Image (cartoon, rainbow, N blue to C red):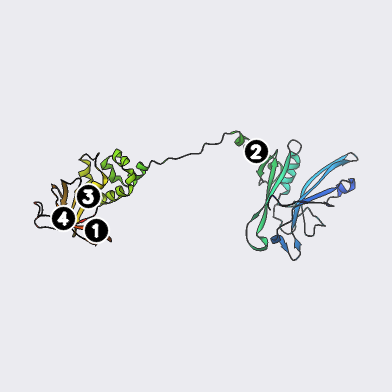
Amino acid sequence: MTATTKKIKTTAAVFELPQKLGILQYVEYEPPPKEWCASDGCLYEGVLTAEGCRKGVCVRYRVWVHSRDRRRWEAKERWRRRKDEDAGGCIRQQVADALWELAEKYDVGLWYEYRRVGVGVNQYDVFCGVVVDGVRLDQPYCRSVEECVEEIIRDYRRELEKMKEPPEPALVVKIDPVEELLKEWPELQAFGVDWVKKWLDLRDRLVEIAKVMRRFPWMVDVIRQRPASILHPYMIEAYVTRDGSEACLSLNQLRAYCARDGTVKEVTLELAFSRYEIYEERTREVYRPKSPPAFAAAAREYVRVL
């Protein structure tokens, strides 16, 4: 039920003692949702109160009651009674008796709410608990009145201690984007952390470089042995022959490093653009040497992969 639902208050005759004393019994309830209604009527639930003193006898009743027609109210539940319940609504009898004992020292009460638990006629169920001095507690699972009293007091004191504790500050975990990138692509550590931090805005380019270095691990050693502090990411170029037998890494326009049969050599790589073609499912630039270099027995075509 929503907080804006209007509550209805009516009189009822449920308990004999208040009737004998002439103390009125009032039931306050909320109209149930349509889903709670069946062919034999609707399930109305509310709180019965009867307070007052007559002829030297004082009573204070506050009990869950139910009705099908809003004329006859009953304190015991017949159609949804659980094994360990002997009181109306969803509060257990031993818990209700424990609240009577606690009422001498504490301001006690009940809370309840409707929760959707299924579909159809029985899609809603009632959940309730106890209130001690304004502190809302879950209903204890206990077998005797004494045990219920102990559990209620223990839960109440525990909640009071929680209220005294200062709220824990929200943990704000700041992830360093440089550390995150190096964790995913450790090959970039060959350039140094400062270099990666400097060119972090070109993250996509750095990832492309790292992918090629992962494919050709010897490039990591080449870069680690040479200063790269002033090297721009787009100055780095990589080429492979179409048959994959040779790979070259160019860090500037003058010198390059090529590996063939596991041997890395420093060479002068002079290439001329030839055409575009599909290589590894991407359109790549294909180059030919301007003249047969000294490190190659015959001119080969190179595909630019970086």
Quadrant in the rendering for residue 304 = bottom left
Relative height, residue 190 to residue 89 (above, below): above
Residue kind at label 3, given as amino acid type: Glu
Label 3 and label 2: CA atoms lie apart by 71 Å
Residue 186, horizontal then vertical, whole percent: 30, 45
Q: Upstream in the sequence, badge 4 or badge 3?
A: 3
Q: Upstream in the sequence, badge 4 or badge 2?
A: 2
Q: Could you tell me which residue is drawn at 17 percent across and 46 percent down?
A: 253
Mark 2 burial class by Cα count in 10 Å: few <14, some 14-19, many 20+: few
Residue kind at label 4, given as amino acid type: Ala
Q: Upstream in the sequence, badge 1 or badge 4?
A: 4
Residue kind at label 2, given as amino acid type: Arg
Horizontally, is 166 left or right of 177 in the view?
A: right
Residue topped by disc 4: 272
Disc number at residue 237?
3
The answer to which of 193 and 69 lies nearer the viewer is 193
Mark 1 burial class by Cα count in 10 Å: few <14, some 14-19, many 20+: some
Relative height, residue 189 to residue 240 (above, below): above
Disc number at residue 154?
2
Q: Upstream in the sequence, badge 3 or badge 2?
A: 2
Disc number at residue 284?
1
The kind of secondary structure element at disc 2 is: helix
The kind of secondary structure element at disc 3 is: strand
Q: Nearer the viewer, mark 4 or mark 2?
A: 4
Q: Could you tell me which residue is drawn at 60 percent across and 36 percent down?
A: 162
Q: Nearer the viewer, mark 1 or mark 2?
A: 1
Q: Upstream in the sequence, badge 1 or badge 2?
A: 2
Q: Are marks 4 and 2 in contact (CB under 8 Å)?
A: no
Horizontally, is 127 left or right of 196 in the view?
A: right
Label 4 and label 3: CA atoms lie apart by 14 Å
Q: Are marks 4 and 3 in contact (CB under 8 Å)?
A: no
